Image (cartoon, rainbow, N blue to C red):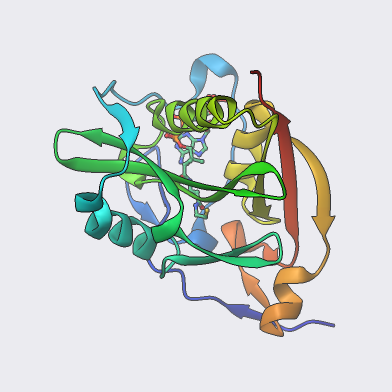
């Protein structure tokens, strides 16, 4: 049996919709509502654009908060966000969210995807994903792929609501690499990498 151990998550990834408290990953819980009673956030004006050299520090910061570093292991490889194609959601000079992509195996591959917790639930994640799909189409790529750890139910939900479907599960990949199962979202043991794919319309 694989041992379970707390993993050091750099910063909270989610806020409680009831009191706005920052949630350590393992303390998050899910609830199901009808669409009408989903927590609503105030609208926010933002734009999505390609990253520029001057954005490097802000990209390092969001990676640090979400992941602890800019090097991300997915699909059996290590990718450095700083040399990927980065699309940013910004409001003025503020970075709100990032989707970092590269071409791997002939598909646009999401390497890193994060919206700062205080800006989630306002359509920023959807706009970033749409922009990434447009980037794929502009390069004549016909599909996109992304990966989530088995515990990351919000991201798994989100991807499936955005046309991705599960293509493959690398069972035990994450716990085997660490030698133990880290404690993830809602205390779920982190074991597997779930790989998803969606078509891209030209
Ligand atoms: C998944 C994520 C990118 C979505 O970004 P977002 O800006 O909140 O997305 P949107 O506002 O466009 O869409 C919100 C949808 O996602 C769901 N959702 C997922 N997490 C949510 C959150 N924390 N707050 C609000 N909605 C959330 C909502 O229920 C909503 O679904 P609906 O369309 O069925 O109503 C964002 O929650 C996030 O960054 N999560 C952390 C991801 C992560 O772990 N990254 C590190 C590893 S790559």
What residue is at 76 percent from the left and 70 percent from the top?
Answer: 173
Q: Quadrant of residue 70?
A: bottom left
What residue is at 29 percent from the left and 20 percent from the top?
Answer: 43
Q: Is residue 3 above or below residue 66?
A: below
Q: Is residue 127 above or below residue 8?
A: above
Q: Quadrant of residue 196?
A: top right
Q: Position of residue 195 (x, y in %)?
A: 74, 49
Q: Residue furthest top?
A: 36
Of residues 20 and 162, the one drawn nearer to the viewer in this rendering = 162
Q: Position of residue 179 (x, y in %)?
A: 71, 85
- Please identify the quadrant where the C terminus is shown: top right
Q: Residue furthest front?
A: 139
- In the picture, measured across the screen, residue 113 lies left or right of residue 155, that is left
Q: Position of residue 101 (x, y in %)?
A: 52, 46
What residue is at 26 percent from the left and 24 percent from the top?
Answer: 44
Q: Is residue 91 above or below residue 34?
A: below
Q: Position of residue 30 (x, y in %)?
A: 59, 43
Q: Please count the marks in the image.
A: 0
- In the picture, measured across the screen, residue 12 lies left or right of residue 111, that is left
Of residues 71 and 61, the one drawn nearer to the viewer in this rendering = 71
What residue is at 39 percent from the left and 30 percent from the top?
Answer: 124
Q: Residue furthest left?
A: 93
Residue 11 shows in the view? no
- In the picture, measured across the screen, residue 152 lies left or right of residue 97, that is right
- In the picture, measured across the screen, residue 145 lies left or right of residue 53, that is right
Q: Is residue 151 above or below residue 144?
A: below
Residue 59 shows in the view? yes
- Please identify the quadrant where the N terminus is shown: bottom right
């Amino acid at each position: 049996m694989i041992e379970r151990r707390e993993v050091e998550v750099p910063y909270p990834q989610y806020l409680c919709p009831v009191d706005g408290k920052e949630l350590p990953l393992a303390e998050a819980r899910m609830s199901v509502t009808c669409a009408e009673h989903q927590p609503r956030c105030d609208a926010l004006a933002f734009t999505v654009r390609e990253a520029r050299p001057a954005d490097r520090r802000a990209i390092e910061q969001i990676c640090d908060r979400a992941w602890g570093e800019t090097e991300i292991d997915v699909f059996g490889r290590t990718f450095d966000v700083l040399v990927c194609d980065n699309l940013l959601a910004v409001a003025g000079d503020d970075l709100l969210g990032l989707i970092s992509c590269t071409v791997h195996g002939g598909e646009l591959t999401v390497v890193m995807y994060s919206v700062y917790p205080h800006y989630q639930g306002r359509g920023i994640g959807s706009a970033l994903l749409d922009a990434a799909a447009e980037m794929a189409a502009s390069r004549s790529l016909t599909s996109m792929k992304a990966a989530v750890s088995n515990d990351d139910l919000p991201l798994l939900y989100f991807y499936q609501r955005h046309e991705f479907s599960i293509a493959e599960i690398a069972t035990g990949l994450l716990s085997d690499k660490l030698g133990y199962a880290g404690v993830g979202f809602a205390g779920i043991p982190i074991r597997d990498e779930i790989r998803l794919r969606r078509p891209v319309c030209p």
